[in-house]
Image (cartoon, rainbow, N blue to C red):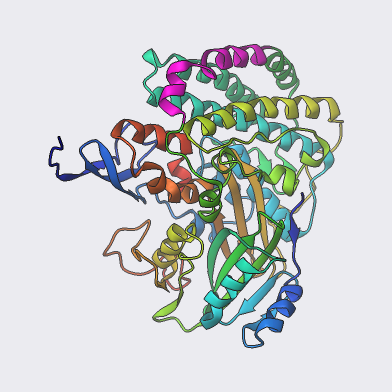
Amino acid sequence: MLLKDLHGDTVANRLSEIDPEWVEKSDFMNVWIKPESLIDVCKFLMSDKDLVMDYLNAITAVDFIDHFDVIYQLTSTVTRKRIVVRSSLYGREELSIDSVTSLWSGANLQEREIWDLMGITFLGHPNMKRLLLWEGFEGHPLRKDFL
Amino acid sequence: MSIRTEPMTINIGPQHPSTHGVFRLRVTFDGEDIIEAEPILGYLHRGTEKLAEERNYVQIVTLTDRLDYTASMTNNQAYCLAVEKLLEVEAPLRAKYLRTMTAELQRIASHLIAVGFFLQELGTFGGTPLMYAFRARERILDMFEMLCGARITLSYMRPGGVFWDPPSEFWSSLDEFLKEFPSDLAEMEDLLLNNEILMVRTREVSPLSAEEAINNSVSGPVLRASGVKMDLRVMDPYDAYSMVDFDVPIGSIGDNYDRFWVRMQEVRQSLRIIEQCVDQIEPGDYRLDLPKVLRAPEGTESYGKVEAPKGELGFYLFSDGGISPYRMKIRSPSLINLSVIDRLLVGWKLADMIVSLGSIDINMGEVDR
């Protein structure tokens, strides 16, 4: 069965039906959700019968100077649908978002990598240490102001 | 009678010969049983994602070679597909076939390394299976040398196609390879697939259930060995994969043997794909005429993904309209497959440790980036 990329607006509409507070905006590919509702949204995406997002492809973060986007790419091994969920964190200091490690264990190393290179803390992560660089390294190299 | 034992923590690596690169594993043992395992990474971290922000789109191709250096071809392919998606262009048909063909040759080479070292780590005498595997891999590397002058860091693919049309000697060597390799492979299969010693050592050792594999975002042969039929070549066909016919072998319980078995079967399927490509390929353009310095519109993003030998390899690109990507993220299969390492090791013996590590087939160039 072929993979199907869901339109961001479709997912946004479905999420708004459950709770209008969750979604910030959406475009043809992404759904932006509020950082504080991340865990609730992910739990819904995992359990909803039309979606069953049981496979987390990747987590990424992008530095947009005034804010950071954390991007979750999800796939379903059951319904073979793919969606992209994003969350914007404003500011540059002491950024944090909830960890999804309790839902998808595959997030463990990737969240550590984002903390290491981008400086975003994941709350509730079992082992929030640097992954690639050594403890005591100053700064987060993938940030645009690092060099 | 039970003897009181004390837990003991041992560091394996970063210079240990069977850790597949500079990989360190901190393992706590109780006697011979593993009670805790933690991977420690970063010894080969070169900051590829940051380097990419300073180079133009074509120059980055050379950076991708150095990720999984046993499978540069598929790294090139994933990156080029991501750039093509970003620019909304498509490679010519001949280039698609050439890419599919070379990517499958690379898959054979990579799987041969994986299988060869897996057996080496089981303690096969004198490294015979490893030499069998390397003998075949050498022929593939010779063909790559004819294509692009390099054997490991290939940079054969470009956004919009491939670097060069294969010379005539490539086609004759490929024909020869396709004639002779199946019997070499059959010899290996005869020796190994039903080998009693191998079965005893690997059957039902370190099993990984399908649910655990999915929950840990594992991909590639490791996921398929657990019985999950996920293969991007079938689920999201890129290049010429929609035009060829092949099977996706899956294992049953995801033990060390299944992971080994799936790789051996995939080599057969890769041969089938290459044969079909050779039959179907027609003369034509091998590369689009794109400008030397590429620019994507501001604010566009793309995610290019391929089924690399080790799993799903993805490149996420975000463009700010400049000559280099604003952000390039590499979803490397080896790193994410490593997240199951403690599940595979805990509860098993010291003697199975390196074998289980070998069965995941990690490559440190890709783990650390």
Does A40 sit left or right of B90 as displayed?
A: left
- How many numbered discs sit on the rendered protein? 0
Q: Is residue A146 left or right of residue B33?
A: right
Residue B6: x %, y % from top left: 14, 44
Residue B354 located left or right of residue B156: left
B193 is within the stretch colored magenta: yes
Along the line of sight, the residue nearer the viewer: B262 or A88: B262
At a point 65% along the width and 63% down the height, the residue shown is: A52
On screen, residue B124 above or below B314: above
Q: Which residues are magenta?
A: B180-203
Residue drawn at 58 percent across, 36 percent down: B252
Of the 4 image quadrants, the one containing the N terminus of chain B is top left
Residue B184: image quadrant is top right
Residue A13, located in which quarter of the rendered image? bottom right
Q: Is residue B143 above or below residue A141?
A: above
Q: Whole-percent x and y of residue B39?
A: 35, 49
| Nearer to us in this view, A80 or B47 | A80
Name the main secondary structure of what is drawn in magenta: helix
Residue furthest bottom as drawn: A21
For the question of whether residue B127 can be seen, the reply is yes
The residue depicted at 74 percent of the width and 61 percent of the height is A5
Q: Is residue A107 left or right of residue A2?
A: left
Q: How far across and how far down the image is residue B254, in percent?
A: 52, 38
Between B312 and B169, the one lying in front of the other is B312
Note whether residue B361 is visible.
Answer: no
Q: Relative to B364, does residue A23 appear above or below in the rendering?
A: below
The spot of residue A48 in percent (x, y) is 66, 69
B261 part of magenta stretch = no
Q: Residue furthest left?
A: B4
